[in-house]
Amino acid sequence: MKLHQVIASKTKIYIVLEFVDGGELYDKIHNGGILKEDEARRYFHQLIDAVDYCHSRGVYHRDLKPENLLLDSSGVLKVSDFGLSAFAPQIREDGLLHTACGTPNYVAPEVLNDKGYDGTISDVWSCGVILFVLIAGYLPFDDQNITILHKKISKADYSFPAWFSSAAKKLIARILDPNPLTRITIPQILSDEWFKKGYKPPSFEHGEDVSLDDIDAVFNNSEEHLVTEKKEKPESMNAFELISRAQGFNLGNLFEKYMGLVKRETRFTSQRPPDEIISRLEEAAKPLGFNVRKHNYKMKLQGDKSGRKGHLSVATEVFEIAPSLHMVELRKTGGDTLEFHKFYKNFSSGLKDIIWTTDTSS
């Protein structure tokens, strides 16, 4: 569901959401009974795409069920109710989530075991239960006694109705695998023969408000003219520009800190000379599979491989804050934000000796 606006008063926070008037997917099953496999598959396509998108942003729903899946007036599926969702920053050092939550009938066995779980894999299990419900009209795991219910889930103790096709059975059996290490993943679901029937990959909007005018102008000018100016030092940054980029004064960063959002830009400071910084940026980018174009103290990095939203591209610029202090800014200009986040983690590890760090514990 799309979030249009957040308005706050002294006592209340108003969240303006997209109006979805088609009701719950649960009502469609409850009122109309079972769905034919083609119709169930159409909803499952949308569910997997939506969940995959959430995972790509570092969000794990943790309460997927037909009651939380809404339909608009055109029958398009919308995932709602992220009240139990987790963000990537909530993952512990072991790489797992540890809060047991969700609706018992839809919860993965590893969540019930209380030993930590992977949010992406546990969400996949819930998607499998939903697919079963869509075609069967009832739950694969159900019992009034919660202990017995947990045992059924842990052993994947269920049976298929006679009307399930063999291909649907095969896919659901791979999803409802009680071992999270061997359970099918979303990329594997996307390549499954039953799933691929009638599937159309989602198209992403590219209207991200990232201004490239300053970066593009430099490279366009350098290519159109035989003689180009070589700047002796980077652009200087005045106090107001510096404050607007500083974490302590940027309200956007305040929300990102608490909401766990993956940012589309990042920056670090360095006490090394600008020419050395540029050289090190180039050295760190090339082994990661990026083509580098540079002019003065601006760089364009273009990934060789296509990701979820095309090729990852990054604009980089070095600014002078003081004679012996520079700030390096990196902005994602194309591709997936989570892939940019992973890129920067690997990229910055190769720059540890030029990144200036201060003790911020106080």
Image (spheres, helix red, strand yellow):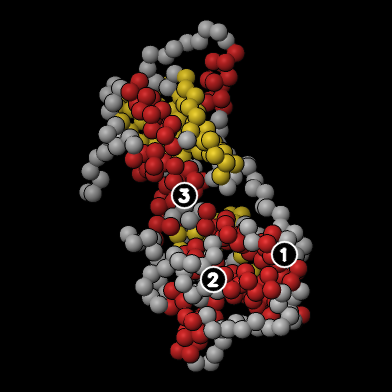
Residue with the mark numbered 2: 125
Instruction: Name the residue type under label 3.
Output: Val
> Where is residue 114 drawn, in percent x and y?
38, 75
Residue 125 versus residue 336 in the image, above or below? below
Q: Is residue 146 visible?
A: no
> Where is residue 41 drawn, in percent x and y?
71, 67
Which quadrant of the figure contains the N terminus? bottom right
> Where is residue 91 drawn, in percent x and y?
38, 61
Q: Earlier in the sequence, mark 3 or mark 1?
A: 1
Circle 1 residues within 10 Å: few <14, some 14–19, many ≥20: some
Residue with the mark numbered 3: 262
Residue 17 versus residue 84 in the image, above or below? above
Is the residue under label 2 in contact with that under label 3 (CB below 8 Å)? no
Residue with the mark numbered 1: 42
Residue at (53% x, 25% y) in the render: 214
Instruction: Name the residue type under label 1.
Output: Arg
> Where is residue 18 drawn, in percent x and y?
65, 60
Residue at (25% x, 45% y) in the render: 360
Residue at (58% x, 83% y) in the render: 158
